[in-house]
Structures are given as structure tokens and as C-alpha cells.
Amino acid sequence: MLNVDISSLGPCLFRSPLHQIGSVQVPYKTEADRILYTNSVQGLQGENGTLSFEEAGPREQIFFDPPRTTVGIVTCGGLCPGLNDIIRGIVNQCYRQYGITRVYGFRYGYEGLVQRYGHTPIMLRPESVSQIHNFGGTILGSSRGQQPIGDMVDTLEDMSVDILFVIGGDGTLRGASEIAKEIARRGLRKAIVGIPKTIDNDIMYLDKSFGFETAFAEAVNAVKCAYTEACGAVNGIGLLKLMGRDSGFIACYAALAGSNVDFVLIPEVSFAMEGTTGLLEALRYRLAKRGSAVIVVAEGAGQELFQADGATDASGNKRYGDIGLHLKDQINAFFKARRMEVNLKYIDPSYIVRSVPANPQDNVYCSRLAQSAVHAAMAGKTSMLVGRWHNSFVHLPLDMVTHGRRKVDPHSELWHAVLESTGQPAMMT
Ligand code: ATP
Ligand code: MG
């Protein structure tokens, strides 16, 4: 069974400063408030039938004394809609609800925690963050590249940071877990609380990740453009590359939302280009039948079509072959060899999709995540992250979540719905 226990810095000796608003009581939670892992009757009888997650929310007794608490925030990895919302939410919650007055924003990801880079942290206040949710990106900046854990903890010690909120993807959260371990090794009492960021919606044990809804709404706009381009030319092909290094959720949802997509290619389902049952023949057939076609490909799809060159980015992530350009070249070559006119328009909107401001749904979701994160940290919970499970906000151990990745199951209803919606062959091998 999974370990869902949340680490704690120690007993909570301070009374929470949160107060009743009119006749409305503070909805305090205790460790007995838990959300079941399973939501099906069959699940209840299974191995994880009794597994449950600690529910997020304010605690009546807290670990940190608010006037003497210093907070830090860092954002790492690629951009994702909602980062500024999370920063704003944390700052507001710290100042307005808990009366904390020292909130530092570390610049450019983990680099900002390493003093030799010289990125001076900025003091964040409610007034300075009041409008930032109207902009995409992160006001703090971000970076990739591994940083020495010891140096980062030194900085937290030097600046007397009691709580560090870490907003980032799997790499960032692995880093956060290492920071928490170093803090424990040094016997310090500092809380590390993560807020998981992934535009691909591929984090395990989460209903959805923040920014996903915004991202896929933006992706749907790009699908519409690809469709318009495809319809506007003889044998028009709209080829759209979307995010999704290991999980094709954005591609699937974008296709389902638009319903004008003929092929969805995702990392979880391999496909062949050549042969009578390959993608190229299926595309030829589709063009003959309809006169145009739209292909949506996730960036991590079809990696088996490339020779692995072992290249990695600054953080050690494997560099992927550009499947969008590969498809473009192969499709053009295939039809040229058959003297068939096609007009392929290739669209790669990734940076546009990543950098838009969060939509209202994500605004709300980010605020709630930020509030939950501050409540958890103030209660002395550490080495954990906040997420939503079965519509409730919960605490999850950092290590549990970074052990795997959520993927589109090729046997799931989701993938079946995609196949129904596109009409593409179930197997293109
Ligand atoms: P994205 O979704 O954009 O990939 P990410 O958080 O996974 O986000 P990465 O660039 O992989 O982005 O990692 C972010 C930061 O975390 C980098 O500074 C990286 O070096 C650091 N990091 C990754 N893994 C570890 C680890 N095991 N220990 C310490 N730091 C790590
Ligand atoms: Mg990553």
C-alpha cells in the first residue's frame, strides 16, 4: 500500500490567527479529515480500499508563530498558465490571513537560492502582486539546471526562511524533496511545501494540475486555426504540435473539444509512418474521402521513429526529436513521390499556449491551491504538496507523487472517445 503519511516539523503550539467572519466559523480541519483514494465500490474491496489522503485546510493550532515567520517562494521549470496566480495567492494568504510580513520571491528558479548567481530575492507584498494574475509567465522568472542542495539550504538558513513554497514540475519537486531531506539532516525546522506544475496534466494522484484548462482551451483555438487552414486549400493538411512530453492529455482533450481532428498522435500509442496500415496511407485515404485533414501530435509522440542521441537539457531531461517537423517532411515527401498535390500547414503554438494568463477557472483553482499550501505549511507540514483529489484539496507526500507519471491509458474510455471522435484507425502499425 502507498505511504500517504505527511511529515510534520513538530507539535503545533500557536493558536491560528484566522478568525470567524460574522457568524461564519473558520472551517478548521483535523488530521482525521481524510479523502478516500478510491471512489468506486470495486475499489473499496481492492488493495487500496482503505487508503485515504489528509484533507487540506486551516488548522486551529499551528506550528509557526506568524509575526516571527519568514516565507520564500520559488518557481522552476517551463512556464505554465497560473504561476502568477499561485504567487499572488500565497502572498495574500500570508499577509492577509496570517499576518506574516516577510515573503521573499526567489528569482529564476533554484538559481535564485544559490548566492553565487547574484539574483537578489524580492520582497513580495499584496500591493505588488495585486495585478500579476492578469499576466502569463512568472514574475519571479524560472530556470532549469540542477543546483547544489547544500547551497540552497545555506541560503534558507542565512535568510532565516522558515517556509519555502516550491512551484514546479516533477524535476522541481524531486529537488524540493532533496532540500527537505537536507533540512532534516541538519536538524532544522523549515517547511517545504510544493505546488505541482505541469501543463501536461501528468501528475499522479491529482484530478488535474493548474493551468491545464487554460492551456487546452488555448490549444483548441490552435486546432480551429489548423482546421481553417486545412479547409482552405486543395488536399489541405493542418498539422498541429501540442505539448505532452510523456502524456497526451492536451492533445486528446483538444481533439475532443473541437471534433474537427482526424488524427491524434500521443506518446502512449506508438504508430508507424510506412506500410499499408501506417499513418501515411491512412492520411491518403482520409484526404481522398474528405479533401482535407487535421493532425494533432503531442511533442513526445513517435519518439521511436528517431535514433536516440542521448542529448539532454540543462536539467538532465532527455531531449526529444521534433516529431512535428519530422511528420511535415515525411508527409510532404510521401505525397510528392506519388505526384499528389497536398498543402500542409504546420503550426507549433507551444510557447503561446504556455505563456497565456490563466482563465477564470484556473484563477480560482490556483487561489485555492495557494491557500491550502499556506495552511499546510503554517501547521508545520513539510516534504509534501497540495493537490485536488475527488474535488477536495488534499496533502500528498512529495516522494509519492514524483515516482511515476499519469498517462493516457490506451484501453481507457478517454482514448476510446478520441478514436470515436477522430475516426482514425485504432492501430497504425
Ligand atoms: P517542467 O514541467 O517544465 O519539466 P520541471 O520542474 O520538471 O518542470 P526541470 O527543468 O526538469 O523542470 O527541473 C526544474 C529544476 O529542478 C531544475 O533546476 C532541476 O535541475 C531541478 N531538479 C530536477 N531533478 C532534481 C533532483 N533529483 N535533485 C535536485 N534538483 C533537481
Ligand atoms: Mg519536468
Image (tube, rainbow, N blue to C red):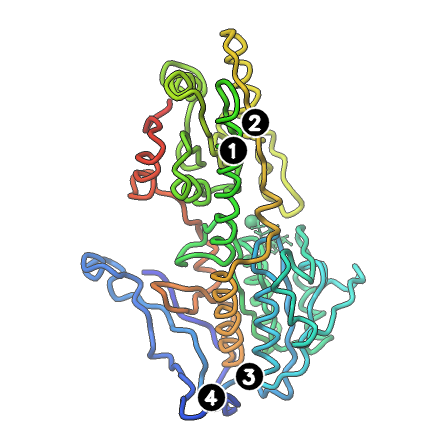
**Amino acid tagged 2:** Lys
Query: Which residue has dot 3 on it?
Result: 97
**Quarter occupied by residue 27:** bottom left
Identity of the residue drawn at 41% across and 54% down: 204
Q: As rendered, which of 73 and 191 lies closer to the eye?
A: 73
Residue 187 visible, this orientation: no
| Earlier sequence position, callout 1 versus callout 3 | 3
Could you say which disc has been placed on residue 345 in the image? Answer: 2
Q: As rendered, which of 345 and 310 lies closer to the eye?
A: 345
Q: Nearer the viewer, mark 2 or mark 4?
A: 2
Query: Which residue has dot 4 on it?
Result: 61
Identity of the residue drawn at 44% across and 33% down: 265
Tell me the SS state at disc 3.
Answer: helix
Q: As rendered, which of 70 and 296 lies closer to the eye?
A: 296
Give how far apart the Cα atoms at labels 2 and 4 are: 59 Å
Q: Residues within 10 Å of mark 3 (few under 14, many from 20)?
A: some
**Amino acid tagged 4:** Gln
